[in-house]
Image (spheres, rainbow, N blue to C red):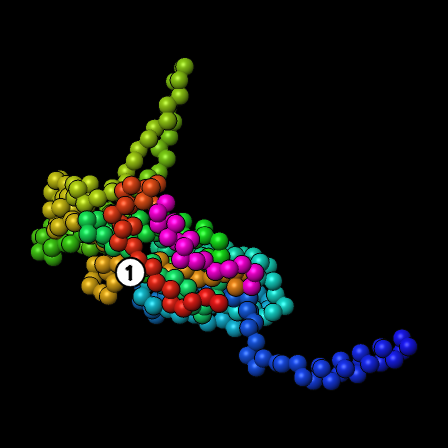
Amino acid sequence: MTTLVMGAILIFGIFAYRLLPVSDLPNVDFPTILVSASLPGASPETMASSVATPLEKQFSTIAGIDSMTSTNSLGSTNITIQFNLSRSLDGAALDVQAAITAAGGQLPPQMPTPPTFQKVNPADSPILYLALSSPTMKLSDVDEAAETTIAQNVSMVSGVAQVQVYGAQKFAVRAQLDPSALASRQIGIDEVSAALQNGNTNLPTGTLYGENHTFTILSNGQSMNAAQFGPMIVAYRNGAPVRLNELGRVIDSVQIDKPRVGTTAFAPSCWPSRSSRERTPLPSSTAFANYCLDCRITFPRLSALTRCMTARFPFAPR
């Protein structure tokens, strides 16, 4: 009897196996890491030769890479590394971090920050856009609120893998030099650039040791706005100092002051994490609505900003 039952199960199993549906395009998440690097003012060709090439040479020594592509634009480089399914994403991230550290000596010293990486596939589509605007705050203040408050808190919502801010307008001080003033004083642009770099530092100064007390010397040489940059001494001519505001205008501005689409709104966009697609529900509009309400209560300064916050879901998560 047992043999007949087992035989029947085997026969039915063989026939049922042939009727099982097979997906032509199965949902497979390959371990993917996105490496980003920035060098303000560098052309795409310079980014490719000075930043992308040293990083790619180090990444090529990592085992288990299926493909590696790089995209170079004005001042930024993005390298997408896709590993085979046999590699653990966490283990691959450690190898990528070690490769970035090894390539640090070959990268330009003018880079403001070292290259960073994210364990997220750039091909994934964002699930939510938050548009921010304010009738009273400056664009640089809106950007600071979006990046330091809104984006960081949204990234802590369960299921969010990445938050990016589009249309950013970071605060910056601009020195608009007069060529006639430079020529009359025989000062080159390289001298002005060196003076700005050397005169805007915040380094430890030292310690004064007394008989009964010890004093730490604090010397803050950082300039925060145009009013502080203006009196900066650029050079000496005929024994007299030449200050920056004598060579042109020094104004408070933003890093990218050219008109472009989206300069009046900042859209932090959210991507779902791999675990959220498999095990946990995606962030809902209710969660972000509660977050916006918490912003108004916790940060009264942002009340005008959050009143102008709108959310848009590109597609409804299943």
The residue identified by callout 1 is 167
Determine if residue 60 is in view: no
In reply to whether residue 235 is colored magenta, the answer given is no
Residue 50 is situated, as x and y percent measured from the top left of the image, at: 39, 64
307 vs 238, nearest the viewer:
307
Quarter of the image with the N terminus in it: bottom right
Residue 179: image location, x then y, percent: 11, 57
Q: Which residues are magenta?
A: 278-294
Q: Nearer the viewer, residue 21 or 79?
A: 21
Q: Say which quarter of the image contains residue 270.
A: bottom left
Magenta stretch secondary structure, dominant: helix
Which of the pair 317/253 is nearer the observer?
317
Q: Is 280 part of what is drawn in magenta?
A: yes
Task: Identify the amino acid type marked 1.
Answer: Gly
Please say whether residue 72 is visible from this viewpoint: yes
When the figure is inspected, residue 297 is found, relative to residue 284, above or below; the finding is above
Q: Residue 215, position in %: x, y?
A: 37, 23
Q: Is residue 71 left or right of residue 67?
A: left
Left or right of 271 in this view: 188: left
Q: Is 59 left or right of 137, judged from the image as shown?
A: right
Judge from the rendering whether residue 304 lies leftward or rightward of residue 275; answer left or right. Answer: left
Identify which residue is drawn at 59% across, 59% down. 91
What residue do we see at 8% from left, 56% from top?
Answer: 180
For residue 297, what is the image quadrant?
top left
Residue at the (29%, 55%) spot, across then down: 309
Determine the secondary structure under disc 1. loop
Q: Pointer 1: residues within 10 angstroms few (<14), some, or many (20+)?
A: some
Compare residues 129 and 225 and report the one nearer the observer: 129
Residue at (21% x, 44% y) in the render: 225
